[in-house]
Image (cartoon, coloured by chain):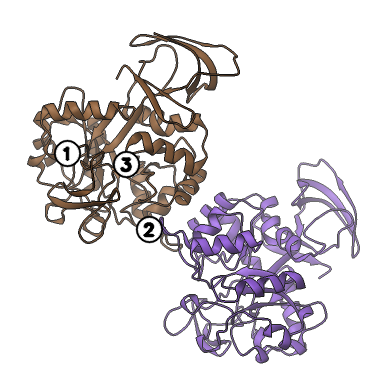
Chain colours: A purple, B brown
């Protein structure tokens, strides 16, 4: 396949008009110095935090559904994602159904009751290696953990040894507890700044720590979880190397408003906003293809920055060869129009 | 007077070893290219927000006390300051006692009852030009006003016409109300982030607006009003051009712990912390000479940045010729040692 005179957006080499030759791998990328271009070619997206889409829910998916999950995500320009669990009995996580190459983001049960968000408090547990007795280590890419919980240090070290990423989240950590985790080497925060201890000027909390230290942070740019101005401010403070766009989307995504489930909690979707009965935000119905448009609109970031926050940063963190439009890389590519609408995906 | 081979710290020209010749005016500044220096020469400090020191209180000072106020401030390296009022009947402000050249910062009564801090709620008023019927316009440099109060727009415009600076503060403004004031041209915030609507990720408040927009912000670097890390983070976000160090100090400053007054409210000073009976922070006992050391320690800023936040920025805003160690400028200078301890002041 040859794409001539497209605007190539590479997180490392930048933006330029060129011609790209690829099959499953990118074989040749040549700058053509044209002033016009036909479409914008970006690295395919990566979503490290997604619970479901179009009726599929990580917590009850069959093998066929996980495969459909993949197909639905391809329609969003996402070539790799972490099916994300919610708090439940660990035994309820359908790991046996997971297709080869797919790995979980385990969100809960190792989280704080004070910042549980839309997680069922009755299943919360202190962090422990029991997780690995139930779910094979090879099927876990990431675990969200509240660093103030008893047992965090041991569990986090155990994850580190196993090559599992620890993401701080659903946490009431003080600034000093956040600093401790950061200094231990755990430098990632789940759906910042949601469901974590807020910024106060005398106790900066995990929000303050996220801004103060060089944490990698997930953001949900749906304009609901945080205001557009917050996302813009965050981008100005953190820069494009320390943000990952996630959807945190639930099974209701892509479906009509109505009643759905997140784990075993009822979720009511109205005008696309997913909430528990008490009004607590319960994930999103954000699609990745919208998320990148929103992020670009909110932050006025460059396309190169957008390629970082939608793909490259997550690839680096997850150890995936990807996130580049450069020779030798897998040709997981998306073509978008000038309004950033998805036109075509390649090799998904 | 000639000072040879001092480290000259000028906010515009930077830091360099040189010789300075001055009487009341700086006549000559020459770089000497020496590697050692005898002391650090900085612009004298400016404090736009100070209620009192060593038993002197703006709200009850006589002319002699205002003059002593000036002398006490000189001992702190401060050559210009705005004696700052607290909320009271406007008639209680002792403007007739104010020496030539001194002007007030009027803090209250045009503030929000929700964010009143240590101000007496019973005297709060909506902003209005009645202020100028009681206190001559020429004696007012600055007024702190909550922008969400009815009458703000008219009053603020009236201040603008009169050359009086409007500083947003003691305010429960929403982000949108803050934006409105900012877009009207009112771009300053009193003792940020204290006594203003806090940052929330869906309603950024005046704290969020202060970070998002290009506001000039006062800070009190006593380690009590905000944690050192907050001040550092603020400095990283705002930069040295948009911060002014203030003390917000009260009459108890420089005196022993005990019971004092701020306006007609009792203030209890314990270990240098000034609080109302209910625990509300009530100004500070911070001395300017400490404030600059704290700020430098908290933020690890350069001396040049320190000269901006302690002098130059306030001079520009207040229309004072000063804040420079450069030829033609008034020689309001301070000599500090490498630990930033005040050694000597000139022409105070």
Along the horizontal axis of the image, is A231 left or right of B266? right
Q: Residue at x 70, y 88 (%)?
A: A61
Find disc 2 in the rendering and name its residue: B198
Same subunit under labels 2 and 3? yes
Label 3: how many Cα within 10 Å (few below 14, some 14–19, many 20+): many
Task: Tell which of B206 and B290 is nearer to you.
Answer: B290
Same subunit under labels 1 and 3? yes
Query: Which secondary structure, mark 1?
Result: strand
Q: Chain of mark 3?
A: B
Q: Chain of mark 2?
A: B
Percent x, y of residue B286? 32, 41
Between discs 2 and 3, the one toward the N terminus:
2
Task: Tell which of B71 and A60 is nearer to you.
Answer: B71
Q: Tell me the tag on residue B286.
A: 3
Could you tell me which quadrant the C terminus of chain B lies in?
top left
Along the horizontal axis of the image, is B60 left or right of B346? left
Which marked residue is nearer to the observer: mark 1 or mark 2? Answer: 1
Task: Tell which of B269 and B331 is nearer to you.
Answer: B269
Between discs 1 and 2, the one toward the N terminus:
1
Outermost residue to the left? B91
Percent x, y of residue B301? 51, 37
A7 lies above or below A184 = above
Same subunit under labels 1 and 2? yes
Query: Which secondary structure, mark 2?
Result: loop
Q: Chain of mark 1?
A: B
Q: Quadrant of residue A71?
A: bottom right
Along the horizontal axis of the image, is A150 left or right of B54? right
B243 lies above or below A302 = above
Q: Tell me the tag on residue B57.
A: 1
């Amino acid at each position: 396949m040859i794409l001539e005179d497209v605007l190539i957006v590479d997180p490392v080499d930048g933006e330029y008009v060129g011609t790209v030759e690829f099959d499953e791998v990118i074989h040749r990328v040549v700058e053509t110095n044209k002033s016009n271009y036909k479409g914008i070619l970006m690295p395919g997206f990566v979503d490290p935090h997604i619970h479901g889409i179009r009726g599929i829910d990580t917590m009850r998916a069959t093998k066929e559904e996980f495969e459909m999950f993949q197909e639905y995500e391809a329609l969003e320009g996402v070539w790799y994602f972490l099916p994300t669990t919610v708090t439940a009995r660990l035994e309820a996580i359908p790991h046996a159904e997971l297709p080869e190459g797919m790995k979980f983001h385990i969100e809960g049960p190792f989280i704080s009751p004070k910042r549980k968000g839309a997680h069922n408090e009755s299943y919360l547990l202190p962090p422990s290696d029991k997780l690995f007795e139930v779910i094979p280590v090879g099927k876990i890419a990431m675990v969200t953990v509240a660093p103030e919980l008893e047992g965090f240090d041991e569990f986090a070290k155990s994850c580190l040894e196993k090559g599992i990423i620890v993401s701080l989240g659903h946490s009431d950590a003080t600034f000093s507890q956040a600093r401790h985790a950061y200094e231990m080497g755990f430098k990632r925060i789940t759906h910042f700044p949601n469901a974590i201890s807020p910024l106060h000027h005398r106790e900066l909390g995990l929000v303050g720590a996220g801004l103060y230290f060089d944490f990698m942070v997930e953001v949900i740019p749906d304009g609901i979880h945080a205001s557009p101005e917050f996302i813009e401010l965050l981008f100005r403070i953190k820069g494009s190397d320390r943000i990952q766009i996630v959807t945190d989307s639930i099974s209701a995504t892509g479906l009509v408003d109505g009643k759905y489930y997140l784990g075993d909690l009822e979720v009511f979707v109205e005008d696309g906003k997913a909430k528990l009965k008490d009004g607590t935000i319960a994930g999103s119905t954000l699609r990745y293809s919208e998320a990148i448009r929103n992020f670009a609109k909110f932050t006025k970031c460059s396309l190169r920055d957008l390629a970082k926050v939608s793909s490259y940063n997550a690839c680096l963190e997850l150890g995936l060869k990807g996130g580049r439009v450069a020779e030798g890389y897998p040709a997981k590519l998306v073509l978008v129009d000038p309004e950033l609408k998805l036109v075509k995906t390649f090799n998904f």
